[in-house]
Amino acid sequence: MIDSSTKYDHLFSHLLPNAVGDVKIFSKEDDYLIEQDYEAITDNELGVWMRLYEKLVEPLNRYASKEYLDGIDALGLSAYEWPNFSQLSPRIRDASGWEVTPVAGFLDEWLFFELNAERKFPVTDIVRQSERLEEKYAGRAIANTDEYTPEPDIFHDIRGHAPFLMNRAFGDFLADVGKLGHQILVDERNLGPELVAHNLKRLQNFAWWSYEFGIMKKQPESENWRTDANDMDHELYGSGIISGYDEVMNVVACSRGESDSSALLPFDMEEVVMTRFDYSDIQDRYYIIDSMESLYADFYDNQRLFFFEG
């Protein structure tokens, strides 16, 4: 896991430790691929899924982007049914060429970007607030609440990310982010480990402030996907926001001018790639894109930013 400091860290702003604590990180040397045991899901696990899902139905219908709302309809997700990976993968594959790949937990950068480059999205089968997560981390102190756990869970992976994989343009973009991450890691330019780590952090910053915690100017056409009109000036496309009720409502309050707890900033590619982030709390800022097309253009037009040479 590339998380330790390098001599180039001083170039970043908003420098934070980004520690994931006692979370198990899986690498290629580990047995990271799993099979989903769908029949083993407990009533408690389904109850957690239902509670989290239902709480977000109204705010996401009102504030999520059309790409998300269209994707969740096409994917056929439900509050009352535990996600079945063997059913979801063919739907996603037909839509964008992606598939969901069940994994044992948090993957290191090599695995994550390599899988993404192959249009395989890693998903876990454990949900927060469940017995299985408690058993996995018995004797270790990790956060495990409705709003946050440092290990991605099935709710974040499926409720947050999977609907976007039903969109071909987004799927192409995400695969190219994966290919870029893999290109940085294999270091064909012979930049050396410190610059590889630094450039990978730049890509992580971009991912964090865009498809994990990004917001977008309100798009008039998105209203066609809603039953309730969006009453703020922005809409949500970052999966880290979408899968957390408190994060959603924080954006809403800031967008409406009811709170100044988080800054709403224009998306500037050079600023974004140089701004670190915090895994463990409500974000103190969000970057606003003009549209999904503008995000894609910023990514493809600024590849040089990910190959800093010192």
Image (spheres, rainbow, N blue to C red):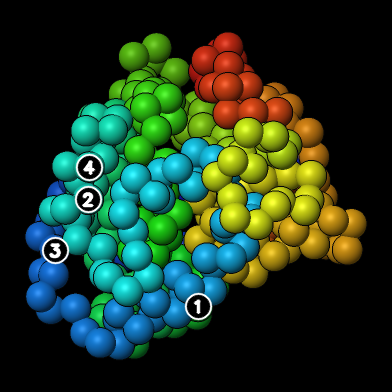
Answer yes or no: do the residues labelled 1 and 4 have beta carbons within 8 Å?
no
Q: Determine the image quadrant of residue 138.
A: bottom left
From mark 3 to mark 1, how far is it between C-alphas?
A: 22 Å
Can you tell which of label 1 and label 4 is closer to the viewer? 4
Q: CA distance from mark 3 to mark 4?
A: 17 Å
- Mark closer to the chain start, 1 or 4: 4
Q: Is residue 293 above or below residue 301?
A: below
Q: Kindly identify which residue carries mark 3.
A: 36
Q: Disc 2 versus disc 4: distance between alpha carbons?
A: 5 Å
First along the sequence among labels 3 and 1:
3
Q: Position of residue 125 (x, y in %)?
A: 25, 65
Which residue carries the number 4 mark?
A: 91
In the displayed structure image, the side of residue 149 where residue 218 appears, left or right = right
Q: Nearer the viewer, residue 92 or 246?
A: 92
The span from disc 1 to disc 2 (Cα, nearest Å) is 24 Å
Tell me the element at label 2.
helix
Q: What's the residue at 34%, 45% (across, down)? A: 74
Residue 157, x across and y down, in percent? 37, 56
Label 1 element class: loop
| Crowding at mark 1 (Cα within 10 Å: few <14, some 14-19, many 20+) | some
The residue tagged 1 is 146
Question: Which one is in front in this view, the residue at disc 3 or the one at disc 4?
Answer: 4
Q: Name which of mark 3 and mark 4 comes first in the sequence.
A: 3
Viewer-nearest residue: 183 or 222:
222
Report the amino acid beneath label 4.
Answer: Arg
Give the total of numbered labels: 4
Identity, as a three-letter code, of the amino acid under mark 2: Leu
Q: Which residue is mark 2?
A: 88
Q: Is residue 180 left or right of residue 241?
A: left
- On the image, the x and y values in percent for residue 280 come to 58, 65
